[in-house]
Image (spheres, rainbow, N blue to C red):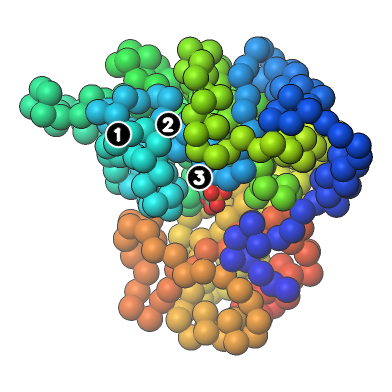
Amino acid sequence: MMNFASDNVYGVHPVIMDAIIAANQGTADSYAGDKITARVEARFNELFERKVDVFLVTTGTAANALAISTMTPPFGAVFAHSHAHVMLDECGAPEFFSGGAKMMPLAGVNGKISPQMVATAMAGFIRGEHDPKPSAISITQASELGTIYSLDEIAAFGDFASQNGLKLHMDGARFANALVGLGCTAAEMSWKAGVDVLSFGITKNGAMGVEAVVFFDGDLAADFVHRRMRAGQLLSKNRFLAAQVEAYLQDDLWLDNAATANRLAAKLADGLEKNGNVRLALECEANEVFAIIPKAMSAYLEESGAVFHPWIASKDDMQHAGADETVIRLVTSFATAETDIDQFVSLVQSA
Ligand SMILES: Cc1ncc(COP(=O)(O)O)c(C=O)c1O
């Protein structure tokens, strides 16, 4: 297949599919009143080593936009990387669901931003009520460029946010890949470092379509049931979302899946680096590889059946790719075949 377009081009992990089928027995209370949902809520408390408020939705866009809507007033400012999913890929959903909050783009290298960048942007807010009110920061873990914020880096955001009256959101569409990359606990990578609300990604790492919005700040969760309902994100047959999550978190399936994806990405990066015509734009820290390759090689790889996307980021991030070069993004998943990596690397060698 050699399909490296995204981790969401793959299907559903068989264990999760079996769980959906197993949930398809008899009747169950609707609108999240079912027993599987209750078990999943308890499981999240265990996973995060404290009481959390958790709500299931169907997409990462819904998770992010609804999470952010609890963290800012309509006249607020939310800071995020200029290439963040919340900034570029959600058709203004965070602005829409927050009732008009202003998303403030920050240009950081390696797909990451820093508290200093937020501070600098806030220092430009000198026009009193003419400016939006700084309200929240959203960071992506792992980032859109496959890089990972260290625990210290997240904690620096947590400290900055609490000192400045801001809330901290984490877009964890690839939370598991980052967690495995850092080798820490879910608690350490979230609330212990100051995250207030987490979009806990599940779909990319093996589910059919479910994400969890996890609140570590109970006040922010207070009206979330209404927000979810109004957004059309409360499923009457919620048991099928919950069944996916239950299977995902059982027996470390989620961590195993992420470890597989990360290992394959590292293997791919190693293989590519050995070729004199290929440079890595960024270090591979999770399950994405960004490689700078000659345009002719890119065409050859595509003609040979490989699927991937060209990627555009800042010139700094792309190591100033030359006119005859292109940057490509290669994403691995829990279901990527090891032979696809071998085949792709040998194609690169023969290009
Ligand atoms: C960083 C990030 N956040 C969120 C999402 C969620 O997107 P979707 O609405 O397609 O589930 C994605 C998917 O590409 C992503 O890469």
163 over 190 or under it: above or below: above
Label annotation for residue 199: none
Q: Which residue is mark 1?
A: 101
Q: Ligand 1 near label 3 (Cβ, under 8 Å)?
A: yes
Q: Residue at x 43, y 53 (%)?
A: 89
Q: Which residue is mark 2?
A: 68
The image quadrant of residue 252 is top right
Q: Which residue is mark 3?
A: 61
345 over 177 or under it: above or below: below
Crowding at dot 1, Cα within 10 Å, few <14 / some 14-19 / many 20+, comes out as many
Q: CA distance from mark 2 to mark 3?
A: 11 Å
Do the residues under discs 3 and 1 have CB atoms within 8 angstroms? no
Dot 2 or dot 3: first in sequence order is 3
Which amino acid, by three-letter code, is at mark 2? Ile
Residue 164 location, x and y as percent? 30, 16
Dot 2 or dot 1: first in sequence order is 2
Quarter holding the N terminus is bottom right
Which amino acid, by three-letter code, is at mark 3? Thr
Q: Nearer the viewer, residue 229 or 258?
A: 229
Crowding at dot 2, Cα within 10 Å, few <14 / some 14-19 / many 20+, comes out as many
Dot 3 or dot 1: first in sequence order is 3
Q: Residue at x 55, y 32 (%)?
A: 229
Q: Residue at x 60, y 87 (%)?
A: 303
The image quadrant of residue 254 is top right
Do the residues under discs 2 and 1 have CB atoms within 8 angstroms? yes
Judge whether residue 250 can be spotted in this image: no
Which amino acid, by three-letter code, is at mark 1? Ala
Q: CA distance from mark 2 to mark 1?
A: 9 Å
Residue 155 location, x and y as percent? 46, 22
